[in-house]
Image (cartoon, grey):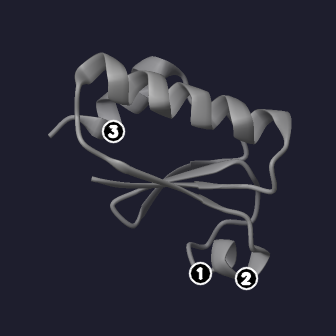
Amino acid sequence: MEIKILGVGCPKCERVEENVKKVIDDIGIHAEVEKVTDIVDMMKYGVMMTPALVVNNETKCQGRVPSIEEIKGWFQI
């Protein structure tokens, strides 16, 4: 699974990263987590608001911090 956290490093972006890592640990999946901070790269995903979460090249949310339960739903195989 490929996960990208899009944002410039604000506190909300950091919370998204923390939540993602917690879910990965909780459900025991193998995933590559990448932080994308370049605005041009973010726009390639159609993201206009950060933070944003991209799972396997699909933008799942933007402009908010998703809940742990929400993230778990997106990570189910």
Residue at 75% across, 52% down: 50
Amino acid type assigned to the residue bearing label 2 in the image: Val
Q: Is residue 60 left or right of residue 18?
A: left
Residue at 32% across, 17% down: 26
Residue 29 falls in image quadrant = top left
Q: Disc 1, disc 2: CB below 8 Å?
A: yes
Counting residues from the N terminus, which is met first, the one under dot 1 or under dot 3?
A: 1
Q: Is residue 18 above or below residue 41?
A: above
Q: Which residue is mark 1?
A: 44
**Residue 44, percent across and down?**
59, 81
Q: Which residue is mark 2?
A: 40
Q: Secondary structure at mark 2?
A: helix
Amino acid type assigned to the residue bearing label 1 in the image: Lys
Residue 34 - label: none
Cα separation between marks 1 and 2: 7 Å
Quarter of the image with the C terminus in it: top left
Q: Callout 3: 10 Å neighbours few (<14), some, many (20+)?
A: few
**Residue 23, percent across and down?**
39, 24
Q: Secondary structure at mark 3?
A: helix
Cα separation between marks 1 and 3: 21 Å
Q: Callout 1: 10 Å neighbours few (<14), some, many (20+)?
A: few
Residue at 66% across, 66% down: 47
Q: Which residue is mark 3?
A: 74
